[in-house]
Image (cartoon, rainbow, N blue to C red):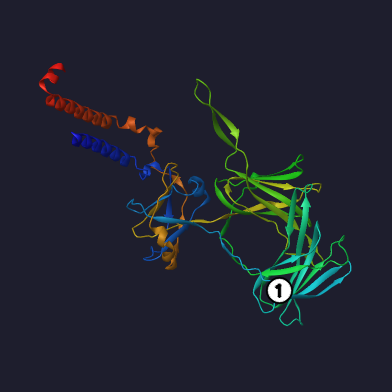
Amino acid sequence: MLRYIALAVALLAASIAVAAAGADDEKLARWPSVAAVRLGAESPPAKGLVEFALTPEAISKARAGLGDLRLTDGAGKIVPYVTRVDRGSSTPGLVQEPARMYNPVFTPGRSSSVTVDFGAAKARTEIDVSTPGENFRRRVMVEASSDGQSWQVLRKSDWLFNVTQENGQYAYKKPRVALPDNDFRYLRVTVFHAPDDPDDLPVEKVQSRYEKNTPPDLAEVRIDPNSTTVAENPKLKATEVEVDLSFEKLPLHEVVLSADDEQFLRRVEVLGRDHKTITIEQIVENAPPRKREVEEPWRSLGGGVIHRFDSAGGQEPSANLSLWLSGGCRYLKLRIYNGDSAPLKFGSPVLKVHRLQEYVAFQAKGAGPYKMYLGNARAVAPRYDLTHFADRLRAEGVMKAALDSVTPNPSYALAVKAIPWSESHKGLIWCAMLFLGLVLVLMVRRQFRRARPDERQEG
């Protein structure tokens, strides 16, 4: 009898599996959007990969994390793919201590300098310069020499900062000076005094390091000038710049302000969100949930300090108007804290925004045309073997492709109104239940036959 029960359970499990297979999320009718992959005039490569960049439109339609993407060939078969985001690279170098620092000299009220010997030719791209004091802004110049006798200007002007703002709540320190890639043995560092500095202002310490940086592959976000607003927030003593980037979930990397002021140093907070309003449900006793629209809160994407200063040699390239961001959004807000200073004056456009490039790569084995489906919120992120050897294939060559505009999927069926499995498979469930009932009847009948006559009569 146990065999009958096991058979019934197996049949029920098989029926559920068949139904689940029928509800497989790989049915492309469940993806609301599709875009063609254009390979161009070239034939797909026999080796290597085909790669295309995701457009802002595709990013906004896809799910965060890109786990809902599906790629198909001309026969409609699923094609494995890998995604990547070009974030650039940075190789931090070890701090190099000088062999000795000598000839510390100063011109009262004007400048202080020191000669630094690193003992041998050592590659470097930046130095850290330590000077005493608080709340200062000091210009610095760096000269270089191979023999300690003849000197050349390596960096004409940069700035050292130690600034406290907003009643001591925010401090900004900048001891670092970026240099051209060099390997001079000797450096001479000259720090020019600020108006309230003492006559004898020593350069306490100089360290160097070599960092090899590869910038990321960025794309500028197209901004409608009419979508940018600039307003003052008197309560916060801040200028708020808001912009609509038109597409959601954009992986932002940096924003560059076009301030026209000659000299400034301001703290900036960067905020973002994907929607102006969102719908929330409020639980009501003995009644359906009540829905209402509320403003979506802003979330922090980062922040930093923007500055520009003029020096004796004119405006130096050390002026930094870039802010590095983390995160994605459609609506962007920059809150520039002015303190008691006048608001900044902006050019046109007010700002530029750059985003990271996101790529999809695959092997073009089957015949085209290739299509990418996206937008299925319930799709499970796929796991392809391609992820383990994509780098090797990339070394064999990469053919660039392009993604066309995203269009509605003509075969999209809205999983229609998400009918519960138990409702859409009533017949299957009734058959399974009847079979189990029959098995139980057979079990009772068998037990009854095995019973002794007196037990049977009593029964």
Query: As drawn, is 109 to the left or to the right of 169?
Result: right
Indicate the secondary structure of the residue bearing disc 1.
loop
x 27%, y 37%: residue = 15
Establish if 238 lies above or below 292: below
Q: Residue furthest top?
A: 458
Q: On the rendered image, what quadrant is the C terminus found in? A: top left
Q: On the rendered image, what quadrant is the N terminus found in? A: top left
Establish if 206 lies above or below 252: below
Q: Position of residue 62 (x, y in %)?
A: 48, 46
Q: Position of residue 221 (x, y in %)?
A: 59, 52
Using the rendered view, name the quadrant where residue 364 is placed. bottom left
- Looking at the rendered structure, the number of numbered marks drawn on it comes to 1
Using the rendered view, name the quadrant where residue 175 is placed. bottom right
Query: As drawn, is 408 to the left or to the right of 457?
Result: right
Q: Position of residue 222 (x, y in %)?
A: 59, 51
Residue corresponding to mark 1: 98
Q: Position of residue 162 (x, y in %)?
A: 77, 57
x 21%, y 28%: residue = 440
Using the rendered view, name the quadrant where residue 117 is placed. bottom right
Establish if 73 lies above or below 283: below
Front residue of 293/67: it is 67
Front residue of 273/163: it is 163
Front residue of 160/100: it is 100
Type of amino acid at the residue the image marks with label 1: Pro
**Local crowd size for mark 1, using a 10 Å CA cut-off: few (<14), some (14–19), many (≥20):** some
Residue 334 is at least partly visible in this image:
yes
Residue 116 is at least partly visible in this image:
no
x 85%, y 71%: residue = 106
